Image (cartoon, helix red, strand yellow):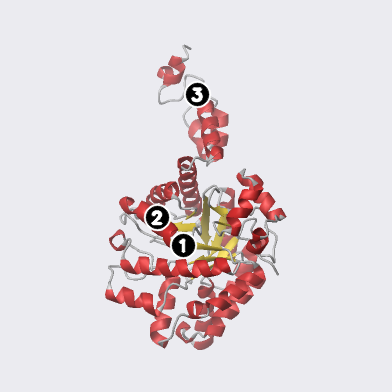
Amino acid sequence: MKTLVDIARTGKSTSLIGKIAKKENIDKKLLIKLISEGKVVIPANRKRSIKSPCGIGKMMRVKINANIGTSSDNIDLRGEIKKLKTAIFFGADTVMDLSVGGNIRKIQNSILAHSSVPIGTVPIYEASINAQKKYGSFLRMSKNDIFDVLKTQAENGVDFFTIHCGITKKTLNCLDNYPRLMGIVSRGGAMTARWIRKNKKENPLFEYFDNVLKIAREYDITLSLGDGLRPGTILDATDRPQIAELKLLGMLAEKAQKNGVQVMIEGPGHVPINQIKRNITLQKKYCYGAPFYVLGPLVTDIGLGYDHISAAIGSGIAAAYGADYLCFVTPAEHLKLPDIEDIKQGVIASKIAAHSGDLARGSTQAWAKDKMMSIARKKRKWQKQIAMSFDPEKARMGRASSIPKVKDACTMCGDFCSMKLMDGK
């Protein structure tokens, strides 16, 4: 069966392509070309219908992802569904289920059933948990255990997979030769690294990458090649292990593209502001134009409790330089499992970063929104300003909490409102 890339390479369209072209206000023929070249992906498993699909990549608006999921300490399916709905309500374009506690299959199926946006997973999590229960240790996990999970999740309708295929004997050797302060901070990366070293075998997701591609083709799943060696501190940013993995992911991305499989690349991590541009440039250089999916990056390590702000700063800059897809970070990062309010704050911060990146990239849709807000502000149209905000409820409460004496001004300036003065009123 043909994938979306196969169809695009014939120059033909689909209803999905048409829907994305309309949402992005882009010529359908141009979008088909970008998909055929691997520069745009549309995560959408052929097994399920998505109410709100999205395009990620070149000439698309910057998209954001929200992470939800249980932990071994906190297993609350209803709570995760509320987080899912909160993330979507405030503007998440996709959601990833990172559950590692409870009945993973049941949780995943419920999230898929309740989601109107693409859903992603990290299959190595479920494979490791299954092996822990079956063998007493995830280190006894077999290749078949891993690929059984990929196949089952694909059949269930998962739209994109994070695959940690860049953690290999070679890249781990690079890490040994160029040690870091924080080592490996990726959960999936650490699981894979421990398995390789314990079993003295190659990473099955790398060694049998053709099998990964076969499953991806069958279900038209988008692969997100995970950055298992992303830096977990700005002190490790842009080091040799990170770049060694990036180069390997670029080679695998090229192979996926040649096989008609949609693919994107995951990136750092913790990166100081002055290194963000270089990180984007290197990804575009080594990864054949595949969309770039960044976690933050967090621009400082000391924002504990406010890491959504650290990440929003990095995300906005990264998006301006060419990052296509932002993974949100919540205030709970490095502290705990995020709650509903954390999810809301993380999504809004990421949406602001994405929109800021769209402005820098010249998006006519983004500029039109800012123009509408500016006109409403100039005319002191408060209800319109509130309606256009990222969090109308908060804006409405803020306005209502301090009633101005001057009807069309605010309590900050009152009679001395600059715009009111310049209007001569």
Residue lying farthest to the top in this orientation? 424
Q: Find residue 284 and report its image quarter.
A: bottom left
From the image, tell me which residue sits under label 3.
378
Q: Residues within 10 Å of mark 3 (few under 14, many from 20)?
A: some
- Residue 188 location in percent, x, y? 45, 72
Looking at the picture, tell me which residue is in the foreground, 226 or 379.
226
Q: Earlier in the sequence, mark 2 or mark 1?
A: 2
Q: CA distance from mark 2 to mark 1?
A: 10 Å
Q: Find residue 275 and report its image quarter.
A: bottom left
- Residue 257 location in percent, x, y? 56, 65
Q: Is residue 423 above or below residue 250?
A: above
Q: Residues within 10 Å of mark 2 (few under 14, many from 20)?
A: few
Amino acid type at image mark 2: Thr
Q: Residue at x 46, y 85 (%)?
A: 137
Q: Residue at x 59, y 67 (%)?
A: 261
Q: Residues within 10 Å of mark 1 (few under 14, many from 20)?
A: many
- Residue 68 location in percent, x, y? 52, 61
Looking at the picture, tell me which residue is in the foreground, 31 or 391.
31
| Residue 163 left/right relative to 415 | right
Element type at marker 2? helix
Amino acid type at image mark 3: Lys
Q: Find residue 283 and report its image quarter.
A: bottom left
From the image, tell me which residue sits under label 2.
281
Q: Residue at x 41, y 20 (%)?
A: 418
Q: Which mark is residue 287?
A: 1
Element type at marker 3? helix
Of the residues tagged 3 and 2, which is closer to the observer? Answer: 2
Element type at marker 1? loop
Amino acid type at image mark 1: Cys
